[in-house]
Image: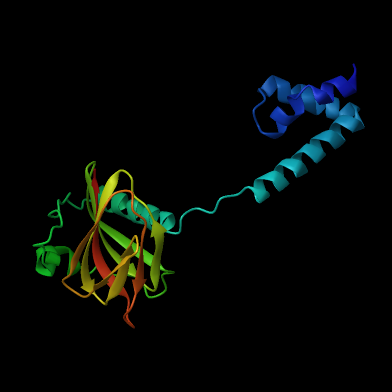
Amino acid sequence: MNTKEYIESGVLELYVLGLSSAEQCAEIEALAAKHPEIYTEIAEISVALEKYAQLNEVAPHPLIKPLLMATIDYTERLKSGEPVSFPAVLNENSKIEDYQQWINREDMKAPVDFEEVFAKIIGYTPEATSAIVWIKNMAPEEVHDHEFEKFLILEGTCDITIGDKVHQLVPGDYLSIPLHVSHNVKVTSKNTCKVILQRIAA
């Protein structure tokens, strides 16, 4: 066997990436045991791919984790018998008391030690997700291309910047975020800003 040609064939890269069949893996591992140069090449490919991954890694958006955890929590609550609910869609006439049945629930509280953002989903359909969200200091910049984001401030105060315009919000205020425009939230009160957040399919 010409080990140089074998190494240059690309089969070892597929093996390191986990794309080889069980038969190919057995063959490669047997050859690596017999030929030190193949074993060394596998080790070098592994190191090179790990370095490439580290250099090109993309950190997930900070809101992904809290919203994912909220989805898991909501799914578990439904499995435990919580009835499905359909909160009213936020609009300029919405009031805090419209959402009192969720706000007053004992299980709708944020832990004291949450990182930056914590969420509890209160209603979900394919067209709309409604949640109570607590923000300690800020929610980073994001852009929505397929859903409108709407806020109703419950507690605390915040500035929501949409493009280059800053909206200063206090409890009872409503704000809708247009599509395709970057926006972020900065808490301006000493206490956590608590909001009703809805994402409505465009």
Residue 64 horizontal/vertical position (percent)? 42, 54
Question: Which residue is painted at 42% across and 74% down in the image?
Answer: 113
Q: How is the model colour-coded?
A: rainbow
Question: Which residue is painted at 34% across and 56% down in the image?
Answer: 70
Residue 67 horizontal/vertical position (percent)? 36, 55
Residue nearer the viewer, 105 or 180: 180
Is 29 left or right of 72, judged from the image as shown? Answer: right
- Figure quadrant of the N terminus: top right
Q: Does residue 158 appear anywhere in the picture?
A: yes
Vertical side of 193 occupied by 7: above or below: above
- Figure quadrant of the C terminus: top left
Residue nearer the viewer, 48 or 108: 48
Question: Which residue is painted at 29% across and 60% down in the image?
Answer: 120
Residue 115 horizontal/vertical position (percent)? 44, 69
Q: How many marks?
A: 0
Residue located farthest toward the front when viewing the structure as drawn: 164
Is 80 left or right of 186, judged from the image as shown? Answer: left
Vertical side of 34 occupied by 55: above or below: below
Residue 83 horizontal/vertical position (percent)? 17, 51
Residue 44 sits in which quadrant? top right
Q: Does residue 80 appear anywhere in the picture?
A: no
